[in-house]
Amino acid sequence: MCLKVSRLLGSTPECWMRLQADYDLKMAAADRDVMERVERIVPVVVREEVGSRGRGPH
């Protein structure tokens, strides 16, 4: 859709994608049910590999 809107109104698809993402985030933040589900998400803890001594990933 953003390709069609950008063509019609003379902007870039990226501009319309950013606007849509901003709108979606604001709507989600205003939705109490969504925010309650987000609050229940447990963050992933990433630990360094023991004994890696600064070497890159294997």
Image (cartoon, grey):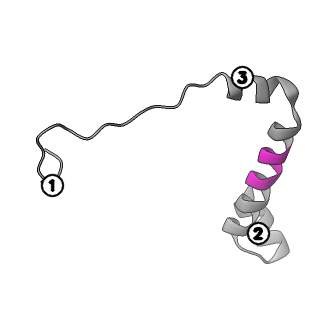
Q: Residue 54 has which mark?
A: 1
Tell me which numbered mark, 3 or 2, is placed earlier along the sequence: 2
- Relative placement, left or right, of 30 versus 48 is right
Residue at 69% in and 29% down = 38
Q: Inspect the image, locate mark 3, and give the three-letter code of the amino acid beneath it.
A: Arg
* Front residue of this view, candidates 25 and 2: 25
Q: Are marks 2 and 1 in contact (CB under 8 Å)?
A: no
Q: What is the x, y in percent for residue 53?
A: 11, 50
Q: Inspect the image, locate mark 1, and give the three-letter code of the amino acid beneath it.
A: Gly
Regarding mark 3 in the picture, which secondary structure is present there? Answer: helix
- How far is disc 1 from disc 3 in space, using C-alphas? 38 Å
Q: Residue 6 has which mark?
A: 2
**Which residue lies under the disc numbered 3?**
37
Q: What is the x, y in percent for residue 44?
A: 46, 31
* Front residue of this view, candidates 12 and 20: 20
Residue at 77% in and 46% down = 25
- Relative placement, left or right, of 33 versus 3 is right
Number of residue marks: 3
Could you tell me what secondary structure mostly forms the magenta stretch? helix
Looking at the image, residue 12 lies above or below residue 31: below
Residue at 12% in and 54% down = 55
Q: Inspect the image, locate mark 2, and give the three-letter code of the amino acid beneath it.
A: Ser
- Relative placement, left or right, of 41 versus 45 is right
Tell me which numbered mark, 1 or 3, is placed earlier along the sequence: 3
Q: Are marks 3 and 2 in contact (CB under 8 Å)?
A: no
Q: Give the residues in magenta.
A: 21-26
Instruction: Name the image quarter holding the N terminus.
Output: bottom right
Q: What is the x, y in percent for residue 7?
A: 76, 71
